[in-house]
Image: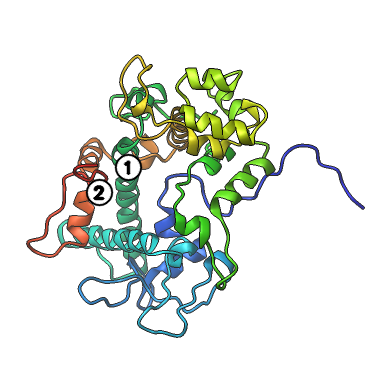
Amino acid sequence: MFVHCPGNREQLNLLTAYVDGSNIYGSEQTEADDLRAHDGHLRGFLATSDGPIHPELPISTAAGEGEAACNNDGDDNFPCHQAGDFRVNEQPGLASMHTLWVREHNRVAGELVQNHGYQDDTEASSNELHHAARRIVIAEYQNIVYNGYLRSFMDAKIFDDFKLNSCMDGSCSYDDSLNPSITNEWGIANRTIETAVTENLFRSDVRNAFDLAALNIQRGRDHGVSYCATRKALGLKVPATFQEAENMQLFSRETIALLESCYDNICDIDLFTAIVAERPLRTRTNLPIKSDSPIAETLNHIQGDMYRKLKLGDRFWYEFQRAGLNGDQKRAIGRVTMSTIICDNVLTEGGDIQPDAFLVEGL
């Protein structure tokens, strides 16, 4: 018996959508418990393994399957690691971020024990310590994502239009009408493409590998996501023809020629293709205010829409009352940057880093 379900395909999400540190602490209780240090009872610190200079992620004893698989060809010099997100072993960049935030949790927990009267000697005191450190680290993470990472590439006007600036002045609050689930448009468009993932994604042998660009295009078609419909939903002007899209400075003349050779109509363009092909805002000369954003107009608005929902739709956002942080704590967290996190957990004595870890001088 077959049941006809009209509409586009929708996936089931296994992870939380919120910017809630689940990549550090896991998305399920059993997973969260497994990531904590054990010594007679669950401790306030996260589990680690010994490293040459600093502690490393704990060693995973499970082989995993699919994206969670880790194959080190039996070489113990390259062990598989365990973290809050099963993709930790997928590539070095992910592993390094997981390592950094585990160290930050343990650094904060150590500060709470040494200077603020917390203890880690009973199950009750360890739980209190763990959750106090976790609340601070999640707040640091949220602050860095919005005030560091996003500001490094998004147009400044987007922060005003989508209420992404600080809520400390009471200018924004929790909105229970918002759905913070990840939108298909964001999931499809928010991906960078390099040769490594267009030719070697999840390579199983010399001849077989996936192409992430092709997967993203097909993913968009499965979900019924299109370029023109996305722009319309975001309140952006929708070009009626390829020529109008060029006149709007959405695409260069050379790109328009390529798109016309592949698509019959401007609104046939796949969203992912358009996101990659659109001109960065900083190259456009027809804007009321010049932008420094290195990404395109449509992607800026997709990002703004999604991160607005993730922030204002999160009742535990660190600036909101239910997060349990006082004004002094929020202001202190607002001073934490990615550079200070790296300084505290990676650099050895005498090391230094640029003030903004997301910006490289000369780029």
CA gap, disc 2 and disc 1? 9 Å
* Circle nearer the N terminus (2, 1): 1
Where is residue 252, by image quadrant?
Answer: top left
| Depicted 285 relative to depicted 142: above or below | above
Where is residue 293, by image quadrant?
Answer: top left
Residue 219 in the figure: left or right of residue 349? right
Instruction: Please state which of residues 167 and 187 is positioned toward the viewer in this rendering.
Output: 187
Secondary structure under badge 2? helix
Instruction: Please state which of residues 265 and 86 is positioned toward the viewer in this rendering.
Output: 265
Where is residue 143, by image quadrant?
Answer: top left
| Depicted 86 relative to depicted 237: above or below | below
**Label 1 crowding class (10 Å Cα cut-off): few <14, some 14-19, many 20+?**
some
Q: Which mark is residue 338?
A: 2
Type of amino acid under label 1? Tyr
Q: Which mark is residue 32?
A: none
Type of amino acid under label 2? Met
Secondary structure under badge 1? helix
The answer to whether the residue labelled 2 contacts the one labelled 1, judged by CB atoms less than 8 Å apart, is yes
Q: Is residue 33 visible?
A: yes
Q: Please tell me which residue is depicted at 57% across the width and 64% down the height of the picture.
A: 209
Q: Please, which residue is most extreme toward the top here?
A: 288
Instruction: Please state which of residues 59 and 185 is positioned toward the viewer in this rendering.
Output: 185
Q: Is residue 27 visible?
A: no
Residue 278 in the image: state x and y as whole percent. 47, 32
**Numbered-mark total:** 2
Q: Please tell me which residue is depicted at 22% across the width and 58% down the height of the picture.
A: 112
Residue 352 in the image: state x and y as whole percent. 12, 55
| Depicted 83 relative to depicted 76: above or below | above
Residue 145 in the image: state x and y as whole percent. 34, 43
Residue 77 in the figure: left or right of residue 1? left
**Label 2 crowding class (10 Å Cα cut-off): few <14, some 14-19, many 20+?**
many
- Report which residue position mark 1 lands on: 149
